[in-house]
Amino acid sequence: MSGNLNRQLSEQEFDAKLSLADFVVGDSDDPLVPPLAFTQWRQAGAWEATLYEPELLATADARTTINYGGKPRSVINLCSYNYLGLANRPEVIAAARDALSKYGMGACGSPLLSGMTDLHRQLERRVAEFLDREDAMLFNSGFGGALGTISGLLRKTDVAVLDNRSHLSLRDGAVLSRSRVDRFEHNDPASLDAALCRRKGKRQLVIVEGIYSMDGDFASLDGLLDVAESHNASVFIDEAHSMLGCGANGRGAAEHFGVEKRIPLVYGTFSKAFGALGGFVTGRVETLDYLRYYAHSYAYSCALPPAIVAAVLRALEIAGHEPELRDRLWSNAKYFRDHLNAIGIDTGASTTYIMPLVVGDRARMYQLGHELRRRGLFVAPVDFPAVPEDRICFRACVTANHTRADLDEALNIVADTFAPALRHPESLRG
Ligand code: PMP
């Protein structure tokens, strides 16, 4: 079922078959009034929906407290993107606090006009130096950075060629640019080759991610770059989840695979391993000089608050001095995934610190989701259409700050609930 549901729902349709994909087109004559069926579906799914927008009552650390059913619940946190634990490092918080005292709360203007501070400039330089690029620019959101960069560079007669698992910010950027948007099969060089052949003669931009945020697998960079180069197509990489976490120096998946020189434009976010907020893009001066005027989300949007910039500067410095954080992240990820697999959990194609725990059935996933929260394990529900229906899952993000005791306790909870439930679904308590 998908697309257009313009009528009252029957009883049976309230069951687990419907998804967000069914309510894109509405039946009302006022855009502020959502489809009636959507409102009914939301009411019918109120219990499931309580797993979304959970309220954290403390920092996004390896253990935290959430509001569950109106009460504080202490949980092992496998939801947050705080991969190196930098969001709650005292030095990072102190840097933000100092900048807050000196610069006040907001930047109060677009970077082009009044929002740029010396801290912003310093961070631009540090990011460019860190990634050995000519220049860098900052965005007040990761999503906005991807949107602005792609729509700022591509034009109507161009072609954006995206991996079909690409993040929505990349897809939306391509759509906003009004360029032609083509897809290739996930990580498949032959499919990329076919896509590039179809639009020969056009300016083409190949768009990939370092680590895919739902599946937790790396881009097959070598093979994809060979194909892009054979067509003289430029490449843009989204290192949102891989920056600081991957590569000997934390320079992302491109460093991990030794292909940095082959990728002219690198984008990342400060909302994951940096533990803060915002985005950046880094590459050649002439590219970014153009982009500063044509990326609307840069030129027409307030700059990052200076306190955030100060925190990111400090986080970058710590990540550079403490490679052991990355080592811990990777050994924790391997430990957790190996043990999950040993108790029969399907973690899909994950080879990184992001891993799906595949359930493959919506009703079962929501029941398990509540059971896991009751028992103190905080993982994210991932429903269709974010993933195919037979891959409905939880997503777990392991961090450097998890102790082996945290991971063992999480594994025990999973073994107690998830694994038997997959074998005997009737054992679930709703
Ligand atoms: N790219 C990818 C691959 C992402 O996963 C995300 C968000 N999770 C973004 C971009 C957007 O980043 P932000 O949350 O910092 O806006």
Image (cartoon, helix red, strand yellow):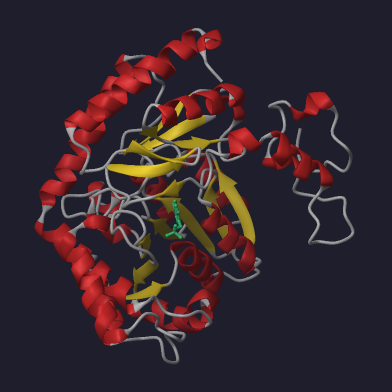
Up/down of 46 relative to 309, above or below: above
State the image coordinates of residue 407 (x, y, percent, origin top left): 25, 30
Up/down of 157 relative to 124, above or below: above
Q: Residue at x 81, y 61 (%)?
A: 31
Q: Which of the 4 image quarters holds residue 44? A: top right
Up/down of 171 relative to 338, above or below: below
- Classify residue 234 as left or right of residue 319: right
Q: Residue at x 52, y 15 (%)?
A: 428
Is residue 134 visible in the rendered structure shown here?
A: no
Tally of numbered discs: 0
**In terms of image quarters, where does ligand 1 lie?**
bottom left
- Classify residue 376 as left or right of residue 155: left
State the image coordinates of residue 292 (x, y, percent, origin top left): 45, 81
Q: Residue at x 25, y 69 (%)?
A: 311
- Classify residue 429 as left or right of residue 36: left
State the image coordinates of residue 115 (x, y, percent, origin top left): 40, 86
Give the position of the C terminus as an image quadrant: top right
Give the position of the N terminus as an image quadrant: top right
Frontmost residue, 218 versus 307: 307
Q: Which of the 4 image quarters holds residue 156? A: bottom right
Residue at the outermost front position:
71
